[in-house]
Amino acid sequence: MKRWILAMALLVAAPQAGAELKVFACEPEWAALAREVAGPQAEIFQATTAREDPHLVQARPALIAQLRTASLLVCSGADLEAGWLPLAVRQARNPAVQPGAPGHFLAADTVRLLEVPATLDRAQGDVHPQGNPHIQTDPRRMALVATALGERLATVDPANADDYRRRAADFARRLRTLQLSLEVQARGLRGARLVVHHAEWVYLFDWLGLQSAGALEPKPGLPPAAGHLAALKAELAAQPARGIVRSPLADPKPAQWLARETGLPVIELPHTVGATPDAVDLPALYGAIVERLLAGTR
Amino acid sequence: MAELRQAIAQLRKDYEVRISDLERRLKAAEHKPPTTAATPPAPRHPKTGATAPAPAAAPLPDPVAPPAAADVAAAPATPPRATDSAFNPAISLILEGIAAGYSRDPETWRLPGFQAAGHAGLPPEGLSLGHTELVVSANVDGWFHGQATLAVHTEDDSTDVELEEAFIDTLSLPAGFGLRAGRFLAHVGYLNLHHPHAWDFVDAPLPNQAFLGGQWYDDGVRLSWIAPTALYLELGVEVLQGGQYPVAGDSNDFVGGAQNYYLKLGGDVGTSHSWQAGLSYLRSEPSGRESGHGHDHADEAGEHFAFTGDSNLTVVDVVWKWAPDGNPRERNAKLQVEYFYRDEDGRLDFGSAAGGALLPYDGRQQGFYVQGVYQFVPRWRAGLRYDRIWSDNALAVAENGSGESDDDLLVESGLLDAGRDPHRYSVMLDYSHSEYSRLRLQYTRDYTLPEADDQVFLQYVMSLGAHGAHAF
């Protein structure tokens, strides 16, 4: 009889014992960060791949089902996911990840954002009122997010709080060391002018002291148009740049056209973890970016 | 211990925030960039620091200068960014306009075999405003979310304001349960849950028009549950007042005049495909349900038919979406199918100034539509739709004191299909300059009546204000 009770108790307790911390990461960079900070025990669901445009995700049933059982969501915030995340979170009815709950972690809330628009008008394209949300290409900001995520994990899962804080501190230290050595490698690039496809490299430019020589998109989110490209070409003739930066996600044709017209090199940079084969994790992402920038502008 | 540490961390954070705030003010007062002496969350490399010009030497901030470390930390002055619009509700306004041309007289429009009602019918010929919609929504607090939709229609000469939605949702019930109360779009099939501005064609498919009066919303309560599984599984039940088409009458029942049960499944197949399927069963007992659009019958001296009996509607829907590698920016496709089956049993009461009649009625009506939409280049989409409805109605005249012949009554009821299954073919092409604006051209070949109708529509749909997230 006692054995039966014990067996039953084990059966009932088993799901709880096996249920690890479950993290829902909106983009690949946050899945990678969560893997570093939450450790091997956590189950991490990555909602979008590096091939997906985070602006255009839909509140798919598969994502709602994952949010239903998540204990923490880690996303960019600053309205990057405004087209789907608020709806998906609401439909998942999971109190743990509702806005305001500790399980609702937005990376953009933990760092200072750039390009906060002075005026809000959709005639300006797809603008984000709180600032540019593509923060992941700056290791300094990523280190801050890592520390904040460690604190947040400690709140969500107090039993392992020390582990989370330790891993977050270790990873932030690793990032800072890497950042400093990459800054030394890239010191020759300081002040270099580069054309971008989409306004997603602001934080990289801020970190390495690069300068934007214009964007292929006339306004954020709008596809490049011939007239705008011609004007850009004329500007570049007057004030030369050193290359054209695009992510593997962006349509290659406008960059190729401008490269043919101006003789500038096209530099393909990973915008997130997994965007190019060499960007296997966050440290590799920053390494790959600097390496490709140096190779491209040589 | 952990609490203490947390409290200290919080304290430290507060101080950092205050210090950087002070620095910011100092900087504003002195017109010079902050020094690297600020409490640095991310320390700067001495080398890069050395390459920067001394702040005092540069009266104007140098764009090439490396940013001070404190610059990457969160700005203290900004309000919390957790919600999409601080404390104001998200407000969006939909503007829609239609130009319609028909080869047949649109006044003769009807659906043989069906008593159309509600918003069923053709958009007005010529230029007209479509749905002007105002949607206001926000989280009320940690427990509730609220939303209201006001729609303005122009019908004939009058402009009507309708409250299409006004509901609250619970956010934090345990174990995946959710409760919705108020007025909302009934969970019947797929398209009925989407606002017309999110539709891929100008008009509702024939089965939605015949069985739901275009789009059906009602007052009531919905209880639903989502399973804790990787496969999306939702079960729900709605009790609805049932005061209007496709129900009518018994609206003073405590549990409403209609109950709707539904099941919804969904998931992904690889990274490029996602799907959703649904099954719903609406059980209702309409009492004195009148058909017609008002103006259809106005010239017939108050003649009307009213249905009383059982009406059960089953709907199956499947939606499949494709986007290469999950990225819909360049190309994407959507395939959508819904099938409707309605079983009605009861009687029709005919009334006019001259007298009345009683017609026992047993009907089985079906319909489906299938549509595909393909975005072949950014901004441009093309779509094809085929919709068809058919009926098998048994109708007789039991008592006739109306002065009209039995045969006339049977014809006037509209439930005889005269050997016709109404069906249509539609093609559409639309262009979206941004995700907030859409221009559409649609051509429909309509075979609802013996004489086919060529229909051409031009439409604009614009959304202003809050970034409206659309359900799958």
Image (cartoon, coloured by chain):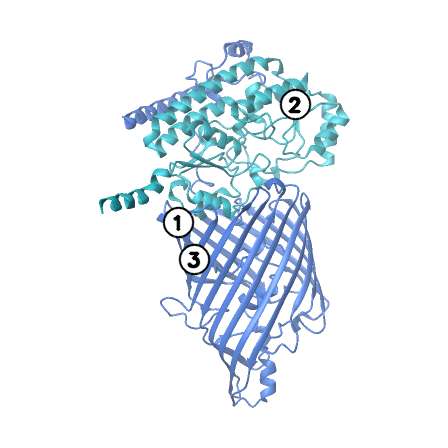
Percent coordinates x, y for residue B191 in the rendering: 55, 58
Q: Quadrant of residue A41?
A: top left
Give the numbered dot on residue B176: 1
- Label 2 element class: strand
Residue most toward the left?
A2
Q: Which chain is blue?
A: B
Mark toward the viewer: 3 or 2: 3
Q: What numbered label is drawn on residue A194?
A: 2
Query: CA gap, disc 3 to disc 1?
Result: 12 Å
Q: Measure the alpha-carbon separation of dots 2 and 1.
A: 49 Å
For image coordinates 57% across by 20% down, the residue present is A287
Kind of residue at badge 3:
Gly
Mark 1: amino acid = Gly
Q: Is the residue at mark 3 from the same chain as the one at mark 2?
A: no
> Does residue B151 lie above or below A74 as drawn?
below
> What residue does disc 3 label?
B236
Say if labels 2 and 1 share a chain: no
Q: Colour of chain A?
A: cyan
- Viewer-proximal residue among B199 and B421: B421
Q: Amino acid at mark 2?
A: Leu
Q: Residues within 10 Å of mark 3 (few under 14, many from 20)?
A: some
The x and y percentages for residue B263 are 47, 57
Is residue B144 or residue A230 the one in the foreground?
Answer: B144
Which is nearer the N-term, disc 3 or disc 1? 1
